Amino acid sequence: MTNANGQEPLLQVNNIEVIYDKVVLVLKGVSLHVPAGGIVTLLGANGAGKTTTLKAISGLLRPERGEVTRGSIYFQGRRIDHEEPPEIVRMGIVQVLEGRGVLEHLTVEENLLVGAHTRPRGDNLQDDIEMIYHYFPSLAERRRIKAGYLSGGEQQMLAIGRALMAHPKVLLLDEPSLGLAPLLVQEIFRIVRRLNEEQGVSVLLVEQNASIALEIADYGYVMENGRIVLDGDAETLKNNEDIKEFYLGLSAVGQRKSYREVKHYRRRKRWLS
Amino acid sequence: MDFFLELFVNGLLTGVLYALIALGLVLIYKASSVLNLAVGEMALLASFVVALAANFGAPSWLAILAGVVVMVAFGYFVERLAFRPLIGQPVISLIMATVGIALFLRGIYFILSNKWPVYLVDLGLPVDSLNLGPVSLLSSSVVGGLVALLLFGLVGYIYARTRTGLALRAVSDNQTVALSLGISIDHLWAVVWIGAGLVALVSGIVWGQRIGVQFGIAILGLKGLPVVFLGGLDSMVGALLAGIFIGVAENVVAGYLDPLIGGGTKEFLPFFIMLIALWVRPYGFFGREIIERV
């Protein structure tokens, strides 16, 4: 499958279906593409299936007894939906888990070292660690501190930096803004943008905070109820009335609507039923 | 005073060996949050294999090598056949699997020991006693204690300094995160089961010399429980110190109390200590701190 430029996307998810515990159908046909060097965002409310989509890509469904039962996932032309997580990391896809996914009892530097676990023995990791500290200077000061004692923002930075230690081609970021102050969120997203531009890492970003995600993304998908209901360029999505309504919380005149109106609107105009 | 000193030093040596049994529990617990209830049976299997090989005329080094081969194979197959199929299942399923393994090993032991009865691990170590001032010790006990300490040092070094050790610490901290970084949990489980098998081999050889190859070795596995609950299930330092504490306590108290009440102190005292430890510090005295930021 090729996109408009005639190039094969780095990562392509084709119409996948995911079932948990052999009965609970969570994804009902999800397709998306991440081009090389791009930032793509996946938006949606709680429970829409965003995290499940990421875990289907990274292979982390199996320990939770989830399974890709239909469709396929290709990375650089190779089918990966039946690979084990270590192999997927080695190929260049690393997921940064939602929440504070740091190893609390390890120091900051040990966390970074574990991030390089899949790389061959004898690789020089010190340069990479310095590179991470260059992007996240506040981690450098705290390199000997146990990660559990870092602030929420620092923990998120550490989780992203640790993922970079594996030299990924695609980073899967699961709600990096969760529970962080707006200024910190701005900072983290700025760094993600820089990593994308300077290191060439592609990003698939799951967010509930649509406005900030669309700031840095080139392309976006919107999920509801286990399906993709809308997709388009970030600019197009930002100006889309439905997105404004549901994810940016704005009405046409730039004001917050009352709940009753929103509800009424929703009832009248659902994307899918 | 001399009597006390003798009880104390002998308790110390017993305690190091209890600590060794506890190490087998801690290794598995750290990697998988599973209490390995087969730890005593594993030591029994190991001591039986070594004693049997020696009985068939194998020289000491070959008998020990036979033990190594059997325990490595055992660790590998436990991971492959019992643990890996249970990934993603509740921890209690895995604990029950270790009970199954324990009963399986008991069965094997009874069948084989009926066919080839062996009574003692005899590796030709000196059996004389050492006299250190007022205290006399069996030299085989001293050797056993030193080997146990060496093993603790080795495992501690692997955890602190090697790449595999770092991965093991990552898994014990957060399994999902470790998996997301490309750490293979299967592989590490095999590593810790093989490690626990080798620890059981050392326990089995030392106890097999002390009390003989008999079902009592499997029962000794139970003595590992008070040790780990006192020291903390995920702490090797805790296992070592708590093992020594319990060994000394039971030996000293039994020395004075047994003549009065007619014996049995060693059987109940460790579990009494465990009960108190559970009241006071449910996570043990060296269990991992739970980090809470305020």
Image (cartoon, coloured by chain):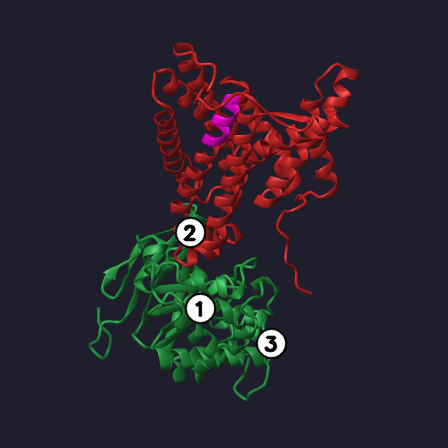
Same chain, labels 3 and 2: no
Residue drawn 61% across and 25% down?
Answer: B137
Q: Is residue B45 left or right of residue A90?
A: right
State the hue of chain A: green
State the hue of chain B: red
Identify whether B229 is placed above or below B49.
Answer: below
Cα distance between the residues tagged 2 and 1 = 27 Å
Q: Are marks 1 and 3 in contact (CB under 8 Å)?
A: no
**Residue type highlighted by circle 2:** Thr
Identify whether B125 is placed above or below A244.
Answer: above
Which residue carries the number 3 mark?
Answer: A181
**Residue type highlighted by circle 1:** Leu
Residue extent of the magenta highlight: B201-209
**A44, A90: nearer the viewer:** A90
Residue B162 in percent (x, y) is at 43, 53
Q: Crowding at label 3, few (<14), some or many (≥20) Cα neighbours within 10 Å?
A: few
Q: How many marks?
A: 3
Tag in front: 2 or 1 = 2
Q: Tell me, yes or no, if residue B92 can be seen here.
A: no
- State which tag comes first along the sequence, 1 or 3: 1
Q: Are marks 3 and 2 in contact (CB under 8 Å)?
A: no
Cα distance between the residues tagged 3 and 2 = 37 Å
Q: Is residue B58 magenta?
A: no
Which residue carries the number 1 mark?
Answer: A173
Which image quarter is the N terminus of chain B in? top right
Same chain, labels 1 and 3: yes
Identify whether B179 is placed above or below B16.
Answer: below
Name the secondary structure under disc 1.
Answer: strand
Residue B164 is labelled as: 2
